[in-house]
Image: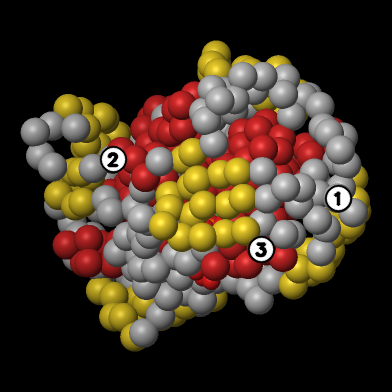
Amino acid sequence: MEKFVITGGKKLKGRVKISGAKNGVLAMMPASILAPGIFRLFNVPNLRDVWTMSRLMNDMGIYSELNDSELFIDSRNIHSFEAPYEHVKKMRASFYVLGPLVARFGKAKVSLPGGCAWGPRPVDLHIKGLQKLGAEITIEGGYVIAKANRLIGSRIHLDIPSVGATGNILMASVLAKGSTIISNAAIEPEITALAKFLVKMGAKVEGIGTNTLEIEGVDELCSTNETVIPDRIEAGTILIAGAITEGNVTIESCNPYHLTSIISKMEEAGCEFDIHEDKITVKLDGPPNPVDITTSVYPGFPTDMQSQWVAFMLKAIGVSKITETIYPDRFKHVPELQRLGAEIEMSENTAIVYGGKQLTGATVMSSDLRGSAALVLSGLIAKGTTEVLRIYHIDRGYESIDKKLRLLGADIVRVQTEDY
Ligand code: UD1
């Protein structure tokens, strides 16, 4: 096992490059199931979740290899249509293989993901959508078993604009017979990027970037190459790292447009920005103002930035409210932050943060990906040494976060540990 040892108090300064989007590439990799061929994806982050998806696809007969940031995929020899529990339990995005498998091969057996660290995470909308496209679905022994001759286009309205359900149904519908309309679809940038990737593969999709996707099914698709969009959550996290340490940090290779809600809240908190086409500089002198946020679907404030915002508000002089509407229980980081001396009260799905108290270093435990980012951010401003355990969580979604923060002047090291 590895842990981070952080000595707080350094103001971050300098520039760092943002990696490709985890949630972007995790949707694109399964799309390669839809066509036999050689794909090349560029700007792919080297992350545990990408390895998990590669292993899962490898077991299905899809060879993949990541060199630097180029991912080579060969999907010509698929021989298994199953996503076993051992992979899906590690990463819910594994469920993305369901739609493409049933669309291309008419069969799939995919483990149900179950819950996660912050509560239940259903997949009912994925299943209902695929059923509307004509798939016959049964649940047996914890697995979703889907069968179909050829899927048939349909009108599908999502009760909630779920990112995963939109992606799965979209990937299934591109090979269905006839037209499909997905209304109340997610418009997260990673879904828009997936739709554009599918179009490059020969799919017919209209309404990309809007919440109504119109798909005209085609008989076959072909392989292609594509560049993964920048990771907006990594970008937001590093912007907060700059601001929370009262530093001056530039992030490069990012898409400022995808960060609008985060930048606007950080401006309210007193941060100054210099924004260019693919580059953002943030500066903050002194503590931030307390600013409330409520998470919502894109373009609202992302749930994946909620825990980092809690950490940021620990530095603000005053009280702020952080309300989680996507995953009401997503507050596993709060008790760990309290171990650093944070004063936070929970009231249902709202964290009330009494900021401005000096945090003191302690040993804390990561329990999920974004929660561990909040622990690292807090370690950067805590007095003394903070040890963050179970950093495999952060490695799932941040490429070399320790190296990037060190490049900006943070005192953070990765060390082997017996601690679990
Ligand atoms: C994706 C992201 C995750 C992010 C989340 C919300 C990936 C790999 N992961 O997760 O980082 O936090 O979007 O932006 O892209 N829901 C249902 N039924 C379903 C599906 C979802 O009720 O069948 C509910 C969920 O419980 C949740 C909400 O819809 O309350 C949003 O979930 P969803 O958008 O599906 O998240 P994921 O795709 O799992």
Q: Position of residue 58 (x, y in %)?
A: 49, 24
Residue that badge 2 annotates = 391
Please state if 221 lies on the left or on the right of 34 as rendered. Answer: right
The mark lying in front, picked from 3 and 2, is: 3
At horizontal 48% and vertical 66% (from top left) the residue drawn is 122
Q: Is residue 217 in view from this perspective? A: yes
Colouring rule applied to residues:
secondary structure
Q: Is residue 239 in view from this perspective? A: no
Q: SS of the residue at dot 2?
A: loop
**Could you say which is closer to the camera, residue 233 or residue 376?**
233
Up the image or down, 15 lies above or below 136; here it is: above
Q: Earlier in the sequence, mark 3 or mark 2?
A: 3
Asked if the beta carbon under badge 2 is closer than 8 A to the nearest atom of ligand 1, the reply is no
Circle on res. 177: 1
Q: Position of residue 87 (x, y in %)?
A: 39, 39
Q: Residues within 10 Å of mark 3 (few under 14, many from 20)?
A: many
Q: Where is the C terminus found, in terms of image quarters?
A: top left
- State the residue lying farthest toward the bottom: 347
Amino acid, disc 3: Gln
Q: SS of the residue at dot 3?
A: helix
At horizontal 71% and vertical 38% (from top left) the residue drawn is 104
At horizontal 22% and vertical 67% (from top left) the residue drawn is 335
Q: Residues within 10 Å of mark 2 (few under 14, many from 20)?
A: many
Residue that badge 3 annotates = 131
**Could you say which is closer to the camera, residue 61 or residue 337?**
61
Q: Position of residue 233 (x, y in %)?
A: 55, 49
